[in-house]
Structures are given as C-alpha cells and as structure tokens.
Image (cartoon, rainbow, N blue to C red):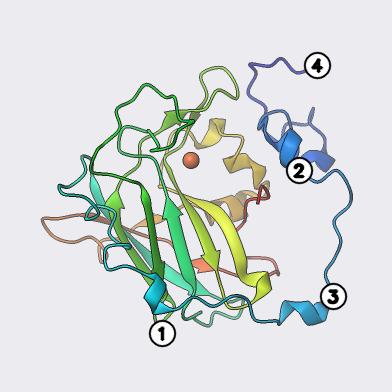
Amino acid sequence: MIADNQIVLPDDPSVGPEVQVDYPGYRSTRLRAPKRPLVTSPEELHSLRGPVFGDESIEETDHDLTAQHEDEPLGERIVVSGRVLDEDGRPIRGALVEVWQANAAGRYRHDVDRHPAPLDPNFSGAGRVLTDADGSYRFVTIKPGSYPWGNHENAWRPAHIHFSIFGRAFTQRLVTQMYFPGDPLFEFDPIFHSVRDPKARELLVSSFDLETTTPEWALGYRWDIVLGRAGGTTPFETET
Ligand SMILES: [Fe+2]
C-alpha cells in the first residue's frame, strides 16, 4: 500500500514495470494514461508531412521572453539554444519550437497556479520560434524557479522549461521538458524519473555552454532535440 504523501518514482519496484505512464507518484497520470494497449500506426503514415508553420505566425519578440513587456522581468537572464535534428543527425528546418515556463519565483501566469510566490508583471512565460536552415533555435528568457506541486510530501519540481515541437512530419510532434544541469531535485522528481532509462533521462538536461553565454549579459545553455521514433531520441511526455 502506497501512502498518499510518499515519494513514488516509477522505477520503485513496488510500482511494477507496466505502469511507467500511470503510477501513483504522478497523480494525474491516473486520468491521462491510456487504459488500453497502444495501436501502432501504419508505416506509411510516418512519412506524411505534418502541419507546417510559416514565418508570418511568429512575432518579433516571441523568441525573447524578456522583451514582451514594458520592462524586463526579474530573475537570472539566460539564453537557451540548440538544434532540432532527425534520427540521422540532419537539421530540421522550419520546426515550430514553443516554450512555457514559471517565472524566477516559480510561479506560472495561469489561473490554477496557486503557489504563493509573486507574479511578475513583466513576464508572461511563453515563447515560440522557427528553426533556421541549420535546425537551430534560440530563446532569451530568465531561469525559472522551482515550485511545489503537491504530489507527495515536500514535493518540488526541478527547474524546467516546457517545450513543444512541431517538426515536418506527424512522427515529429514532441512535448517534453528541459532541465538545468546539477539540479538537486532530480532524484526526488517522479516526472523526471518517468523516463526510466538513466541515459535517456540525461538527454532532458541541458548543458551550460560558455559559447552561448554572452559576456556581461546572460548565461547560456544548450539543448539539442532529436525527433523520430527510434532509440536515442529526446524522451517525450506521454500526457499529450
Ligand atoms: Fe512546469
């Protein structure tokens, strides 16, 4: 019997191997996880082109979450950039990369976020950009704070940025989370551990990068994203 306030990671032997997308440590998976076996889509669907987004749907400040209001948001300014690649390492051009995140105090600008941390009038926490010919994307933002999420006693999420990517084919749709290196909350986080392979989990953690770091202005983090269906691709969330 698992108590309601106990930390349960999906690799806990008491959870069982079959419930990696539905386990008590992440309560809402009980409602979201499929109850019936997954259906494999026919191979011919994998190559079908997905929705393609044009430049006209992107505003000038969409990639810069620090420039969407009258003043700058509070917090540690950072640059997050990387490349979107396919399984063969080829760049995916024109992929729509969208992000959303908490502010520096760990609060989302969202009606149901009741964490008693301050909202920042200069931070909405959402951005979007299209990858260039090299498959590269770049966001300017502030480092998100950790926040409590109530799934177990003293439960705090590691700092993270939510990512959504629309690639060029239906198999290149991805929703996931990017983390920051060295976060002490990794070992307690059921969502991070819902990716059970430790090597795959590491693919969710960005790297501090001195080249992306801008002198006198912002620290830089790099995070590459691999879309596809074979092993070695960026792990995805199953809640979509
Ligand atoms: Fe979040």
Cα separation, mark 2 vs mark 1, equals 36 Å
Identify the amino acid type marked 2.
Ala
Q: Earlier in the sequence, mark 3 or mark 2?
A: 2
Instruction: Give the foreground label among 1 and 4.
Output: 1
Residue found 20% across the figure and 40% down from its top: 74
Q: Earlier in the sequence, mark 3 or mark 1?
A: 3
| Residue to which mark 1 is pinned | 133
Image quadrant in which the N terminus is located: top right
**Circle 1 SS class:** loop
72 or 77: nearer the viewer: 72
Kindly indicate the quadrant of the structure image that contains residue 137. Answer: bottom left
| Residue to which mark 3 is pinned | 42
Residue 23 x/y as whole percent: 74, 33
Residue 122 x/y as whole percent: 23, 43
Identify the amino acid type marked 1.
Ala
Residue found 30% across the figure and 37% down from its top: 104
| Residue to which mark 2 is pinned | 33
Q: Earlier in the sequence, mark 1 or mark 4?
A: 4
**Residue 156 appearing in the image:** yes
Residue 93 x/y as whole percent: 47, 81
Identify the amino acid type marked 4.
Met
Kindly indicate the quadrant of the structure image that contains residue 50. Answer: bottom right
**Residue 228 appearing in the image:** no
| Residue to which mark 4 is pinned | 1
